[in-house]
Amino acid sequence: MINVTDIQVMKPLLASHGFHFSKAKGQNFLIADWVPRQIAEDAGVDRTAGVLEIGPGIGPLTQQLCLRAGKVIACELDERLKPILGLTVGEFDNLEIIWQDVLKTDVKALVAEKFAGLRPMACANLPYYITSPILSALLEAECFDSVTVMVQKEVAQRIAAKPGSADYSAFTIFCNYYAEPEILFDVPAHCFLPQPKVTSAVIHLKVRENRPWDIDDEDIFFRCVKASFAMRRKKLSNGLASGFPELGKEGAAAVIVECGFNASVRGETLDIPDFAKLANAIAKRRAK
Ligand code: SAM
């Protein structure tokens, strides 16, 4: 197997194919062999797993996934990588590469088609310019057991943040609604070529089998979360009144008190059960 994380191997391999890194496609390739190994290990990939990899690049993580998984589907946007991947991962018969934009892919249908009888997982060193849309699509597809991805460290911290902290955001709640996040380890910038400006981190999202909240209307729940964080430095009643104009200022204040919160509470201190309570109260009011 070609050691693609060895810079002495990688550089001539890329040069012989006239390949130049595309910043626009978020191409920072791994040059530390412990990283892809650790990701595949910590994700719990084994023969029972069907793994969707996003952005194989020249295949360091793909190799480690193929060595462990029942099947791997790798989705790559950049067709210039075709001949290189042919050399670096061509030997694996449990691998299929699909040459398309993951954001234009029906992930749920792909998983149903390719991973029958396997435990679906997603694993990736994500292109950072589209981390949030990819993660959102993977979680909303509701078809994976887990999602293990490398992202910017600050994004990982945002995903795993606790209520009331500076990193806590609407995206925190979105991710925690679907999954239980755990930051696994940091990856310094010198582990990549070219070096990114930031430290990275690998985060494991164990998808929830059951969500332990009664939420009457998912749409209202997420609108409520968004509205609360849109004005995070202001009182929650202001955010709710602007996110749900039909409530008006008085209605928004009444909902907050009715749910047992202090009238001057700020949205950034609330957890998922709190938002569920608020959203259900709003839904009830709208139904009247
Ligand atoms: N997995 C390789 C590694 O760890 O060295 C490469 C990771 S690099 C950070 C991100 C990869 O995602 C690149 O190969 C890039 O071409 C690919 N990519 C970028 N946007 C994509 C998209 N919308 N759909 C699929 N792949 C994409």
Image (cartoon, grey):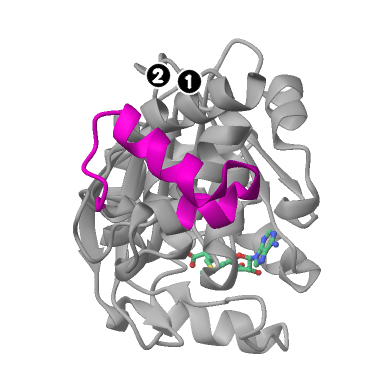
Mark 2 or mark 1: which is in front? 1
Q: Is residue 276 magenta?
A: no
Which of these two is toward me, 10 or 213?
Answer: 213
Query: Could you tell me the amino acid type at mark 2?
Result: Arg
Q: Residue at x 40, y 52 (%)?
A: 237
2 and 1 marks in contact (CB < 8 Å): yes
Under tag 2, what secondary structure?
A: loop
Residue 158 locus on image (x, y percent): 32, 59
- Badge 2: residue crowd in 10 Å (few <14, some 14–19, many ≥20): few
Give how far apart the Cα atoms at labels 2 and 1 are. 9 Å
- Residue carrying label 2: 211
Q: Is residue 241 magenta?
A: yes
Residue 45 locus on image (x, y percent): 39, 31
Q: Quadrant of residue 127?
A: bottom right
> Label for residue 254?
none
Which of these two is toward me, 156 or 82?
Answer: 156
Start-end of magenta stretch: 239-265
- Residue carrying label 1: 215
Q: Quadrant of residue 44?
A: top left
